[in-house]
């Protein structure tokens, strides 16, 4: 039985970095990358727990997350591109017309 | 239950089936109903001969009534109740109502009065309404009225009676408002209709109570079961029936509509508002004797209402200058006498009906006479502009005089016998009631003499463009017939015929000993009437009559001119508070109910305005709330798992 604690700790650190990045950065590309970081920290945790329990459930879930992430990249980058083309800016705070 | 021991005296309605002539009973109602249907449905095509058809139908009904009456006289005394089952009207749950007719001595007398006087008034109307473009419609309504009234009288159960009751209400409404182009006539019709509805409410509640208590509404069923009901139920029944009677018979407190009803054509006033319809209340009480005999409280209330009304109407009659309204006041008063008779119980039922018959004759006579006078005076109704009409209209004058002598109770005339009997019974009951009835007789003498003097005697006061002339024969012949009946109807009392004849329906006349010998009472009544007549002679006949009514008059005169403030009382006690209550309820609805709902909606709307500020459009603030939410859920799960 391998000790997975370091992997989980790393995963938590990566997730926190991603989280803080999403909340504080204005550039849409950076926010996007932070989201990817959070997804991958989750993947790491899934794989680590799969190793600990000795079954493949976690690893399969990690594959699903990767597929979703890839799809998300396609859609997300396309949206960011379009916004940039019309407003000449990639700041998430500028795109705030849809409100109360 | 206290009266159980007396229960044996109260006749029970137990009719036999019809056979021979009596099976024609349904025709009495069907003929005028057919007349009304033809005249109303065929429309203008019948304009030329519609009035003849209407009169013929009414006369046909009279002939059938006469045949039935002769047939009834030929039967044994114990066999004088026949009923005819036409069809089952409806059957709901435990309530089965047949379309049944009941013919007994009481109904027989009413039938003759309604169809007889009704036919005479039809004949009279041919002349009176000659120049009215809607004469055919008038006759249709008259026929409808006669049919409804006959339904009321002939029905064997209270529901059928109610059908007729509402029918006469409808006909009365149509006829009071016949000259609908006059706003006053339309308003009077509406007033009569609404005030009658108050009474009808009482009658319909009484019928409902009957069904709950006895499970039936037929006269035979109720009269057989009445002695088994509790006294409270019977008292409630009696009071509800009285309320109905008050509405239809214009008794205080529902008297207000009768004076306004004089807006209708004069034959209507004579037929409906003097001779027949207004007596329906008296009929109801006499017919329901099996209830009233067991509810002495209700009987006492009937007597109180009757005495108040007979004085109320008489006082109004003293001050009216409109000849029809003076007669209407007198009608109210005379129906008060009938109610008094009916309220006295077995001692008075037969005399109430006797007075009803004689009154039907002499009041129809006088109303038609008044119509004849108006006809000759360019439809003026103000007696102050009449005077000395007797020279121009000898026939009208003489016939009217017969009615006059009958109503004041001149010895030998019909009213003398009938009113005298009621006062005698009232005196036997109590000094107070008898004394007030006696006083009413004196006032009757006063106002009728005043009316007579103002119209036919004193000097002429009409304008030069008025040319009084005698009415055509089609109008005077009914007057002559009615005058003869007014004089002679007293013979019904000969040998106590009418009391014996009615005994199977209302019971034997209970003989109380009056406090004075009968002859002394008769003399007293005649004396009091003579005082009233003399007072009128000195106050009206001997003086100059001003054409405009004097304004500096006593409070009593002013009150009587304003119908003793009956309308003001209604306004103050019912209409005013009703209006205030409605106002209050609408206010409460708008403020309280609407306030709660609109207030809640406005509050939630305001909260939404505040909360939507959270939707600020910044993605990162959404992300923060997302994170916060996730943390909250996690902490909550943790807390649950730890506990």
Image (spheres, coloured by chain):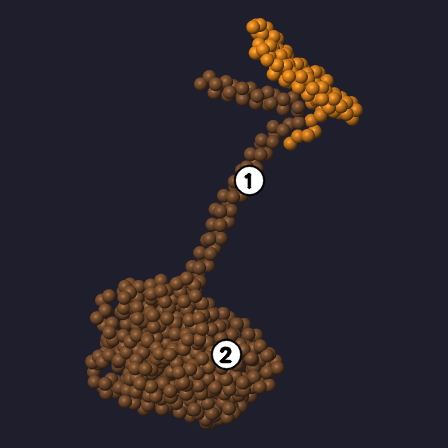
Residue under the point 63% across and 22% down:
B623
The residue that label 2 is drawn on is B33
| Residues packed near mark 2 inside 10 Å, few (<14), some (14 to 19) or many (20 plus) | many
What hue represents chain A? orange
Residue under the point 44% across and 18% down:
B643
Q: Where residue B568 sits in the image (x, y, percent)?
A: 42, 67
Element type where label 2 sits in the image:
helix
The answer to whether B232 appears left or right of B160 in the picture is: left
Q: Nearer the viewer, mark 2 or mark 1?
A: 2
Element type where label 1 sits in the image:
helix
Query: Compared with residue B429, is residue B68 higher up or lower down, i.e. above or below?
Result: below
Q: Earlier in the sequence, mark 2 or mark 1?
A: 2
The residue that label 1 is drawn on is B602
Residue under the point 49% across and 43% down:
B596
Q: Quadrant of residue B561?
A: bottom left
What hue represents chain B? brown
């Amino acid at each position: 039985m391998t000790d997975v604690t370091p992997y989980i700790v790393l995963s938590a650190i990566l997730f926190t970095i991603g989280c803080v990045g999403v909340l504080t950065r204005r550039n849409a590309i950076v926010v996007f990358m932070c989201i990817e970081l959070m997804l991958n920290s989750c993947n790491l945790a899934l794989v680590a727990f799969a190793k600990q329990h000795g079954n493949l459930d976690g690893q399969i879930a990690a594959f699903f997350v990767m597929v979703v992430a890839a799809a998300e990249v396609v859609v997300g980058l396309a949206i960011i591109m379009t916004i940039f083309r019309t407003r000449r800016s990639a700041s998430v705070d500028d795109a705030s017309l849809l409100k109360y | 239950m206290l009266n159980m021991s007396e229960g044996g005296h109260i006749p029970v309605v137990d009719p036999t089936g019809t056979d021979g002539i009596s099976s024609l009973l349904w025709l009495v109602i069907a003929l005028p109903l057919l007349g009304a249907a033809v005249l109303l449905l065929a429309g203008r095509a019948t304009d030329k001969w519609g009035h003849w058809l209407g009169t013929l139908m009414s006369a046909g009904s009279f002939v059938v009534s006469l045949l039935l009456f002769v047939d009834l006289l030929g039967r044994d005394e114990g066999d004088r109740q026949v009923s005819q089952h036409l069809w089952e009207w409806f059957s709901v749950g435990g309530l089965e109502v047949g379309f049944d007719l009941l013919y007994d001595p009481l109904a027989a007398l009413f039938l003759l009065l309604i169809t007889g006087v009704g036919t005479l008034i039809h004949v009279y109307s041919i002349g009176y309404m000659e120049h009215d473009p809607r004469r055919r419609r008038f006759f249709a309504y008259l026929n409808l009225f006669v049919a409804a009234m006959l339904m009321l009288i002939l029905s064997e159960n209270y529901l059928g009676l109610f059908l007729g009751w509402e029918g006469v209400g409808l006909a009365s409404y149509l006829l009071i408002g016949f000259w609908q182009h006059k706003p006053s006539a339309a308003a009077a019709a509406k007033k009569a209709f609404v005030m009658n509805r108050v009474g009808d409410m009482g009658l319909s509640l009484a019928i409902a109570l009957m069904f709950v208590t006895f499970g039936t509404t037929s006269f035979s069923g109720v009269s057989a079961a009445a002695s088994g009901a509790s006294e409270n139920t019977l008292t409630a029944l009696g009071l509800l029936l009285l309320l109905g009677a008050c509405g239809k018979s214009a008794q205080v407190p529902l008297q207000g509509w009768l004076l306004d009803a004089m807006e209708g054509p004069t034959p209507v006033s004579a037929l409906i508002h003097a001779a027949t319809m207004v007596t329906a209340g008296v009929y109801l009480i006499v017919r329901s004797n099996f209830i009233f005999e067991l509810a002495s409280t209700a009987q006492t209330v009937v007597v109180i209402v009757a005495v108040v009304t007979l004085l109320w109407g008489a006082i109004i009659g003293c001050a009216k200058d409109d000849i029809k309204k003076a007669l209407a006041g007198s009608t109210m008063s005379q129906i008060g006498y009938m109610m008094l008779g009916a309220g006295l119980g077995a001692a008075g039922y037969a005399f109430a009906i006797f007075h009803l018959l004689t009154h039907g004759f002499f009041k129809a006579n006088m109303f038609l006479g008044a119509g004849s006078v108006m006809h000759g005076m360019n439809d003026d109704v103000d007696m102050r502009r009449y005077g000395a009409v007797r020279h121009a209209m000898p026939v009208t004058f003489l016939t009217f005089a017969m009615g006059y002598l009958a109503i004041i109770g001149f010895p030998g005339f019909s009213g003398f016998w009938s009113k005298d009997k009621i006062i005698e019974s009232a005196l036997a009951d109590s000094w107070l009631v008898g004394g007030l009835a006696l006083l009413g007789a004196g006032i009757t003498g006063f106002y009728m003499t005043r009316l007579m003097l103002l119209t036919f005697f004193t000097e002429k006061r009409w304008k030069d463009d008025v040319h009084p002339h005698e009415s055509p024969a089609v109008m005077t012949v009914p007057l002559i017939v009615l005058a003869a009946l007014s004089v002679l109807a007293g013979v019904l009392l000969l040998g106590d015929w009418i009391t014996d004849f009615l005994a199977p329906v209302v019971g034997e006349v209970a003989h109380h000993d009056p406090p004075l010998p009968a002859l002394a009472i008769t003399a007293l009544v005649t004396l009091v009437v003579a005082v009233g007549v003399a007072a009128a002679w000195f106050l009206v006949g001997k003086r100059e009559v001003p054409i405009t009514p004097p304004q500096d008059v006593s409070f009593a005169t002013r009150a009587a001119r304003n119908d003793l403030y009956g309308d003001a009382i209604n306004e103050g006690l019912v209409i005013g508070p009703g209006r205030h209550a409605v106002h209050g309820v609408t206010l409460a609805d708008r403020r309280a109910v609407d306030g709660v709902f609109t207030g809640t909606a406005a509050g939630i709307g305001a909260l939404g305005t505040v909360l939507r500020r959270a939707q600020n459009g910044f993605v990162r603030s959404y992300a923060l709330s997302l994170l916060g939410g996730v943390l909250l859920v996690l902490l909550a799960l943790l807390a649950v798992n730890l506990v």
